[in-house]
Amino acid sequence: MTSTLLDNIGLLVTNDPAHGFLTAERENAAIVFEDGVISWVGDAGQAPPADERVDVDGRCVIPGFVDSHSHLLFAGDRADEFERRMSGQSYAAGGIRRTVAATRAASDDDLLERATLLVSEMRAQGTTTVEIKSGYGLTVVDEVRSLVLAGRLTSETTYLGAHVVPPEFADDPAGYVDLVTGEMLEACAPHARWIDVFCEAGAFDEDQARAILGSGQARGLGTRMHAGQLAPSGGVRLAVELGAASVDHCTFLSETDIEALSSGNTVATLLPGVEFSTRQPYPDARRLIDAGVTVAIATDCNPGSSYTSSMPFCIAVAVRDLGMSPAQALWSATAGGARALWRDDVGVVAVGRRADLVVLDAPSYVHLAYRPGVPLVGRVFAA
Ligand SMILES: [Zn+2]
């Protein structure tokens, strides 16, 4: 058993609700952790003795990022589509099928190696908790395989058999929904914590989404949803009605959607990398925050619509283009992500929580948005 003292923290962001809302900051702080768990938080110079002392020399320390939305199990990339979009073509959901074909053809080793590389990229940029979805297999065997491989990288695995209708079911979407809610669910559920559905034109409509998430709930899975990416739909209200942990994208929202979100417990997860990479309009985070909605931000790391693994990048875009303050964006990327995954052991720096800590090479987290694109993540402690 080794204890570590992180000393001389210039600015510590705790997100500890006991110390006020939002980031809850303290100056000249220190932290002790032991066996991956925080055992003491207080003023620098007052810490109990520890086996090891790390002097961070006035730097800012924040909770590790919680990236609550990613699709890391895939093969191939779609740089050509990105290039065409940046030359004026618009985004449509259909490109997913290209990645499905490449993923089915890839070996387990290849898929795992690529996903492991992406998780290391994330870690180097301060992410200590990541959710990973299946959804590029879309057969019973390929979806199970994706979830088994994802389970080697995280405990936050999400069954997304309902990503799109695969080409072999193009004439029988109802038959595919039967598969997703039947045999595929049975095979995938033991390897998943969550079930998700892409509720959007070109993917699944609200009735299908209701059937899919309902079947997962009955099988004991928590629910989450992709909705409101390309146009407003009833998907957001459906997510709230079903008690989903999170509804993700929320780019297009009606007043009724906002009212539903503010009266329910579903987190609205914004994915600014998507709008950046598709040149769609950005969601309005301020409107959600003003209405009292809990907002998270995540990367949505995937080869089609947002091929970034960087939470600092998403924070910078959230501040610049979604109308968030630096403090709100940081909270949403840490404590907000934790809420979107129903986790209370991460996203917060407090005694008894996991020692997931990021030392920034900066005096303040404001620099994450103020100095976009600069690698400010110095040291990362993960549990
Ligand atoms: Zn997604």
Image (cartoon, rainbow, N blue to C red):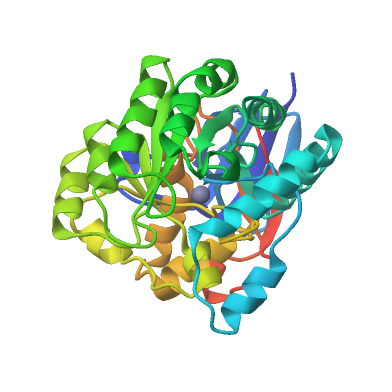
Q: Nearer the viewer, residue 238 or 301?
A: 238
Task: Locate the C terminus by quadrant.
Answer: top right
| Residue 247, percent from left and from top | 36, 45
| Residue 67 showing in the rendered view | yes
Residue positioned 23% across, 48% down in the render = 234
**Extreme front residue here?**
171
Residue positioned 34% across, 71% down in the render = 323
Q: Nearer the viewer, residue 101 or 267?
A: 101
Residue 219 falls in which quadrant of the image? Answer: top left
Residue positioned 43% across, 54% down in the render = 202
| Residue 35, percent from left and from top | 67, 23
| Residue 125, percent from left and from top | 67, 55
Task: Locate the N terminus by quadrant.
Answer: top right
For the image, the number of numbered tags is 0
**Extreme bottom residue here?**
87
Q: Nearer the viewer, residue 206 or 335?
A: 206
Q: Is residue 337 above or below residue 313?
A: above
- The reply, left or right, for residue 203 in relation to residue 255 is right
Residue positioned 47% across, 19% down in the render = 182
| Residue 343 showing in the rendered view | no
Q: Nearer the viewer, residue 256 or 212?
A: 212
| Residue 79, percent from left and from top | 70, 68
Residue 354 falls in which quadrant of the image? Answer: top right
